[in-house]
């Protein structure tokens, strides 16, 4: 059996047979080539297919790669209107018999479609709008979850979500940055000076809500799983909405997979305003103030996340080093787009 970065595969198989109900006969392990934060593997066993998701090896930034949070939130959402895979087992860092020596969890493998290009070139025009509507519906369902009912009332801290998140990502960015990006410094100053007051709204937020973090049904526009919950917390729902709406503004080329520069009407895709309006209807929101702040914050946060990936690549811990190099080129582009949103080109 080939080792794909999981150490002693036979020992892993024995561990899973002890801890995962019904698991039997690990036969094959293959690493998914996509993804940057937490490396992920497909496990094929006599009992079926499973997915293993682990912390990366090496020295990690504080509060990053919290696969235990992913496991907890997806376990809590089982049976809700938010589609998630079935969770089987969480192995902790300090668990004596943990065969990997680092935290990981095992979940169900779901057979479906993942779309990597937001223009959806593999679909016909009428199907594209349905995919976006399904994403919109799932986002509204997520923000409508009763966190008390699903046991997640302590999943985040109280207080101004955007103030806390801005502070967090400033620290993460400064801990990772290797070369100055002047627009990032300008953006940090602007965000701190233009922080909106806390309106008291708090829901479960995904933190990385985008097309390629969803699995769609093989034969329709239905979302069957929302994945990659590492950044989830209790926070402001407009953070998720603005983060997804970055996709309308990012360029379609240069590896960013946005919708910028495309004729969305010709493709059958909603424009940003239509998408936001549909979300507001689903959640009973009359209007959104400070929209450019939420967008600028989203660009900053994404750039800070990418800087962390670039730093891990520099330190030899990236899951996909070539993709990390693409991200390094994207950081100043994201920062410039955010600065433009603030109305200044200092």
Image: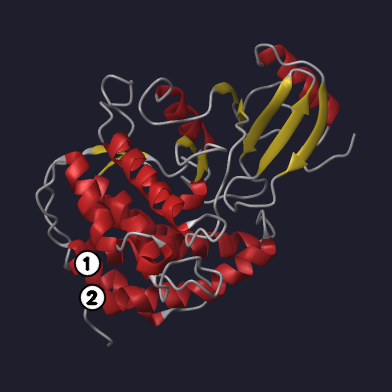
Q: Verify CB contact (< 8 Å) between mark 1 and mark 2.
A: yes
Image quadrant where residue 167 sits: bottom left
Q: Is residue 221 visible in the rendered structure shown here? A: yes
Query: Dot 1, crowdedness within 10 Å: few (<14), some or many (≥20)?
Result: some
Q: Which residue is mark 1?
A: 292
Looking at the image, which is closer to me, 111 or 179?
Answer: 111
Q: Is residue 14 above or below residue 173?
A: above
- Side of 52 relative to 140 (left or right): right
- Side of 300 relative to 253 (left or right): left
Query: Which image quarter holds the C terminus?
Result: bottom left
Determine the residue positioned at 43% across, 22% down: 78
Determine the residue positioned at 47% across, 30% down: 84
Determine the residue positioned at 66% across, 53% down: 319
Q: Position of residue 120 (x, y in %)?
A: 51, 58
Total labels: the figure holds 2
Cα separation between marks 1 and 2: 7 Å
Q: Which residue is mark 2?
A: 342
């Amino acid at each position: 059996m080939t080792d794909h970065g999981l150490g002693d595969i036979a020992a892993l198989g024995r561990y899973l047979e002890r801890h995962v109900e019904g698991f039997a006969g690990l036969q094959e392990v293959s690493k998914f080539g996509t993804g940057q934060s937490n490396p992920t593997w497909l496990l094929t066993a006599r009992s079926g297919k499973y997915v293993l998701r682990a912390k990366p090896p090496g020295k990690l930034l504080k509060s990053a790669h919290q696969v235990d949070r992913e496991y907890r939130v997806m376990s809590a959402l089982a049976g809700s209107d938010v589609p998630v895979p079935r969770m089987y087992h969480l192995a902790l860092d300090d668990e004596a018999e943990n065969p990997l020596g680092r935290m990981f969890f095992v979940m169900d493998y779901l057979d479906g479609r993942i779309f990597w290009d937001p223009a959806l070139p593999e679909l016909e025009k009428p199907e594209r709008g349905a995919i976006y509507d399904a994403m919109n519906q799932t986002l509204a369902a997520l923000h409508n979850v009763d966190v008390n009912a699903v046991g997640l009332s302590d999943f985040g801290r109280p207080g101004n979500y955007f103030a806390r998140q801005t502070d967090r990502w400033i620290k993460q960015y400064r801990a990772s940055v290797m070369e100055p990006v002047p627009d990032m410094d300008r953006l940090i100053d602007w965000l701190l000076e233009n922080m909106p007051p806390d309106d008291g709204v708090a829901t479960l937020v995904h933190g990385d809500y985008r097309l390629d973090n969803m699995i769609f049904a093989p034969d329709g526009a239905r979302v069957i799983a929302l994945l990659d919950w590492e950044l989830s917390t209790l926070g402001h729902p407009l953070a998720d909405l603005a983060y997804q709406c970055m996709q309308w503004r990012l360029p379609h080329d240069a590896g960013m997979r946005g919708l910028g520069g495309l004729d969305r009407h010709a493709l059958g895709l909603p424009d940003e305003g239509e998408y936001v309006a549909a979300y507001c209807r689903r959640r009973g929101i009359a209007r959104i103030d400070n929209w450019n702040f939420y967008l600028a914050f989203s660009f900053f946060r994404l750039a800070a996340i990418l800087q962390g990936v670039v730093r891990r690549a520099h330190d030899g811990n990236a899951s996909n080093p070539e993709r990390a190099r693409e991200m390094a080129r994207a950081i100043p582009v994201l920062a410039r787009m955010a600065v433009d949103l603030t109305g200044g080109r200092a």
